[in-house]
Amino acid sequence: MWIHAGIFAVIIVLCMGVRMKKIHLSALEDAHGRRLFVMAAVAGNLLGIALTWQKGRPETYGAEDYLIRLEENSYEEIFEAEIQGEKVRISVMVPQKETESTSPPEEAEETQEQGIRRRLEEEIAVLNEERADEERYYLPQSVDGKAIVWVKPGSTDGAFLAALFLTAGLAAAVFRENEKLKAEEKRRDQLLLDYPGLVMKLTLLVQAGMTVRSAFRKTAADYEKRKKEGHERYAYEEMITACHEMDSGISEGEAYERFAARCNQVKYKTLANLLVQNLQKGSQRLLEMLETESIEAFEDRKRKARVLGEAAATKLLVPMLMMLLIVLAIVMIPAVLSFW
């Protein structure tokens, strides 16, 4: 049972260490991931305790105890035989009912432990030959005048189950953390991908004579129409949130700043600064700055597209090499076999 106590201690130490920031384990820093880990680990440990309580305690076999022979086949039981303080691990093969005796294996140049094991096997065979019981298989209580204590070790399935659930809980927390990081990376890439188009649309609307606020609302409203078709984009979702904030009484400048903070990207913070400066100092150079920002955003997008293209070409090397090996095998194997 000490293994289960140790597992409870590991769970407590990990959770407390992460919460106190003494242990840096990103998978458990998130509250949901930590809860998932604790639930899986505790549930597995409790199941393991129940299994250990049922099958994990060692059994001592006395003179009146015996092993049951089966009709279908023989089976093996592992025992620890203690003879005057010396313990020997021995495998006892219980024959099926039709078998009357078992002959111990012959061993050459045996060690002391092997010699004790051989003598025990001989005594087991002799005892069961004398009793000739087809239903029961007995264990001798002494050998060469020395008393034997037969102990059947408890099952370790409970400890294994608890350790398995502990590992599974940690793996689930790590998997959830990885999924969270992938979602954040996907959101970041999508925000950067949508930025040039968003700035270009704002620029065109401002050039058409709209105010910045009207252009901002118009862009969000157009997205809401496309959203009904299933096109959800994070940047435009944040624009809709900013419009709702302005409708609820938050100032326009603060709404732009909150929009940039939620996007959490340098480019969106630059755009928000331009819009806030327009509110504070007027729109004398706003159109020029938006055009410059739009051009720079499209240049960044083209650079990123080139990088992604090079990365995709690198990833294709492995399948191309595999196809090359298959083609070589198709050509070479018949040629080699033709020589034979």
Image (cartoon, rainbow, N blue to C red):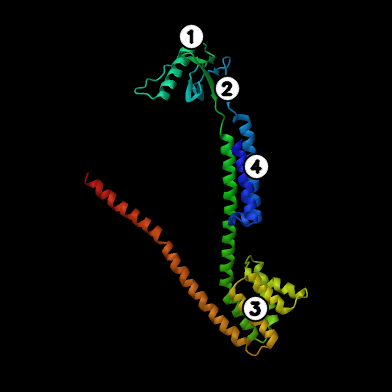
Left or right of residue 75: residue 243? right
**Res. 130 mark:** 1
> 75 or 90, which lies in front?
90
Residue 145: horizontal and vertical position, in percent?
Answer: 48, 13
Give the amino acid at mark 2: Thr
* Residue placed furthest toward the bottom: 284
Whole-angstrom CA distance, mark 3 to mark 2, is 78 Å
Nearest to N terminus: mark 4 or mark 1: 4
Pair 4/2: label in front: 2
Name which residue lies at 61% across and 39% down: 4
* Residue placed furthest toward the front: 85
Label 4–label 1 contact, CB within 8 A: no
Q: Identify the element where label 2 is drawn.
A: strand
Whole-angstrom CA distance, mark 4 to mark 2, is 31 Å
Please tell me how crowded label 1 is: few (under 14), some (14-19), or many (20+) other residues with Cα within 10 Å.
Answer: few
Which residue is denoted by mark 3 in the rendering?
272
Residue 329: horizontal and vertical position, in percent?
Answer: 31, 51
Q: Is residue 264 above or below residue 151?
A: below
Which residue is denoted by mark 4 in the rendering?
43
Q: Identify the element where label 1 is drawn.
A: helix
Give the amino acid at mark 4: Ala
Name which residue lies at 59% across and 85% down: 289
Pick the quarter of the image with the N terminus: top right
Nearest to N terminus: mark 1 or mark 3: 1
**Res. 60 mark:** 2
Pair 2/1: label in front: 2
